[in-house]
Amino acid sequence: MSQEVPNSAEKVNTAAMGEIFEISRQIKDVIRLEIGEPLFTTPEHIIDAAFKAAKDGHTKYTPNAGHFSLREKIAARLNNDYNLNLYPANIVVTTGGLGALATSIKALIEYGDEVLIPDPSWPVYEAVITAVGGIPRYYQLKSENDYLPSLTDIEEKINSKTKILLFNSPSNPLGVVFPAEKVKELVAFAKEKNLYIISDEVYEKLVYEGVHTPALAFDTDQRVIGIYSFSKTYAMTGWRIGYAVASEIIAPKITKLQEPFTWCASDISQMAAEAALDGPQDCVETMKMVYQKNIEIARNILDTHNIKYQTPQGSMFMWINIGPNNSGEFCKNFLLKHKVATTPGVSFGPTAKGFLRISLVSKPEDIEVGLKRLITYLKRYSILKEE
Ligand code: PLP
């Protein structure tokens, strides 16, 4: 395939996490710490609402932007949670947060434009930007800055083709929650540089330390697009339902792009999402408490053996330093020898080779056994001194 085709399917790299996933499926009794989805089944009242909706005939196409009633509820809950001033016209319901990301990026770029993404970050950013004809450009998140974006580091990557600054808080894989001041600074910076912002906030409800601040709170001139999802908040990954929040100028462009990609999000899932917003919210707290407990279990084990890691302030992941090892080989061999699946840091960006990510959504006993095996494996490779 010729180099002049920047969005060819061949260029979309989806292999990064795939190998571990594939191998782990073939091994019996594997401990799975690589999965980025809640362990829980969707709360029962949401499933019941979906059953009812299907029986009532919610089995059709819907408007491209989603049911007006759902968009009303989403706008109301964001206004309530974050003191925003949104209307249904600002909301585009999509097939997961990923559908919102893909169509928002596509709506904002021309072929060959560049999108700035964090290193490390969710590997699908690189893939989705490439898939819609853009060029991903990494800016580094550094431990000396507490893994918060530095304006100097971002500025170095800007050129005449740069159109979007993407950031993610609470973040995958780092678990960092941006303080309000940082979010404000980033929005002001984007204004100065005339960049759009895509703020991926799909983990907004999984915050253990600090407070989540949406980038939309500081948007003065319609350059921010917020990306949200029901996947993580309500354990609804398989329902494929999320949304983009944008100005009255950009939201119609994102809406227009629903038609050629998917037409609309599933009717049944949209009704389930309404039930999620209308219903009791204690299910979110319950799940959060389990993840929080898992963080404590993981920290105790890692601290005992002096392993460096990033304490998650939010999201559902822990970022663990494995020293000079190459995480690609390391995670594969660790899986084959000790039957524990983890995600290699190398999947998350160019500078993340010496890290791996574990998910905190597994059973506590799996976290414990999985991390103890990790310690054994690290010791065998002389990365840890024997006590
Ligand atoms: N953004 C981040 C950072 C994620 O980790 C994920 C999923 O893992 C998504 C967006 C998309 O989630 P979904 O499409 O299920 O809403």
Image: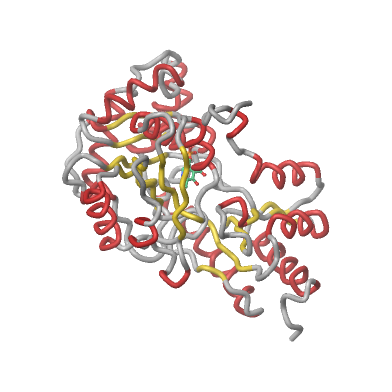
Q: Give the percent coordinates (x, y) of residue 271.
A: 39, 26
Q: Nearer the viewer, residue 3 or 319?
A: 3
Image position of 54 with respect to 361: above or below? above
| Residue 277 lies in quadrant | top left
Question: Which residue is located at x 54 percent, y 65 percent?
Answer: 295
Q: Is residue 264 left or right of residue 297?
A: left
Query: Measured along the vertical axis of the image, is residue 77 above or below residue 254?
Result: below
Q: Residue at x 72, y 64 (%)?
A: 369
Coordinates of residue 159 in the picture (x, y in percent): 36, 46
In this view, the residue in front, 41 or 261, is: 261
Q: For this view, does 61 lie left or right of residue 71?
A: right
- Color scheme of the displayed model: secondary structure
Relative image position of residue 16 (x, y in whole percent): 64, 45
Q: Quadrant of residue 228?
A: top left
The quadrant in which the C terminus is found is bottom right
Residue drawn 35% across the image and 19% down it: 64
Measuring 24% from the left and 57% from the top, which residue is drawn there?
Answer: 184
Residue 323 x %, y %: 65, 71
| Quarter of the image that includes the N terminus | top right
Relative to 70, 249 lies left or right: left
As displayed, is residue 218 above or below residue 42? below
Farthest residue to the bottom: give it. 387
